[in-house]
Image: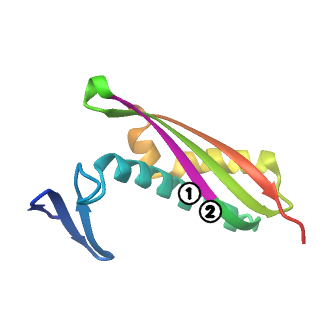
Amino acid sequence: MEFYLKENGMRVDLNYGELSISGNEDDGFRPFQLMVASIAGCSGSVFRKILKKQRMEIEDLTIHADVVRNPEEANRIEEIALVFTVKGYNLNPQKLDKNLELSRKNCSMVRSVEDSINITERIESIELSR
């Protein structure tokens, strides 16, 4: 990847399109947003693949992320709490928890930062009826 200087930040051209990065939300994505998005996106993608392999009937999956930053240390990210809301049929809470643990072990983004950012995950399941 090559990053290019622009007036209020940086940009990178990727296969999917151009990504603008800036400390100001008016000029691009903020670096901490990209960090949280990469962790939630990776974790969610791996979790979904595991659920699909196990043929669990999932209708929807959303992830809410709460972030704690430390203003005393350059606003570093200290904690990310991810809440996975799974909507589906015949959901087994124990199996969902086990699959979430497995996804954590296989998510490269979580594994990359697990020694420096406290990441917690939990599941809220919503049973749908037919």
Q: Amino acid at mark 1?
A: Gly
The C terminus appears in which quarter of the rendering?
Answer: bottom right
Residue position marked by numbered label 2 in the rendering: 48
Placement of 83 over or under 17, stated as above or below = above
From which residue to which does the magenta span run?
62-70
- Viewer-proximal residue, 54 or 3? 3
Relative image position of residue 13 (x, y in whole percent): 21, 71
Q: Amino acid at mark 2?
A: Arg
The residue positioned 65% from the left and 61% from the top of the image is 61
Relative image position of residue 114 (x, y in whole percent): 44, 36
The residue positioned 43% from the left and 54% from the top of the image is 37
Relative image position of residue 79 (x, y in whole percent): 46, 33
93 with respect to 108 (left or right): right
The N terminus appears in which quarter of the rendering?
Answer: bottom left
86 with respect to 83 (left or right): right
The residue positioned 24% from the left and 63% from the top of the image is 20
The reply to whether the C-beta atoms of the residues labelled 2 and 1 are less than 8 Å apart is yes
Distance from Cα at disc 2 to Cα at disc 1: 6 Å
Placement of 22 over or under 66, stated as above or below = below
Q: Secondary structure at mark 2?
A: helix
Q: Residues within 10 Å of mark 2 (few under 14, many from 20)?
A: some
Placement of 60 over or under 122, stated as above or below = below
Q: Main secondary structure of the magenta part?
A: strand
Placement of 18 over or under 41, stated as above or below = below
Relative image position of residue 71 (x, y in whole percent): 31, 27
Q: Which disc, if any, is residue 44?
A: 1
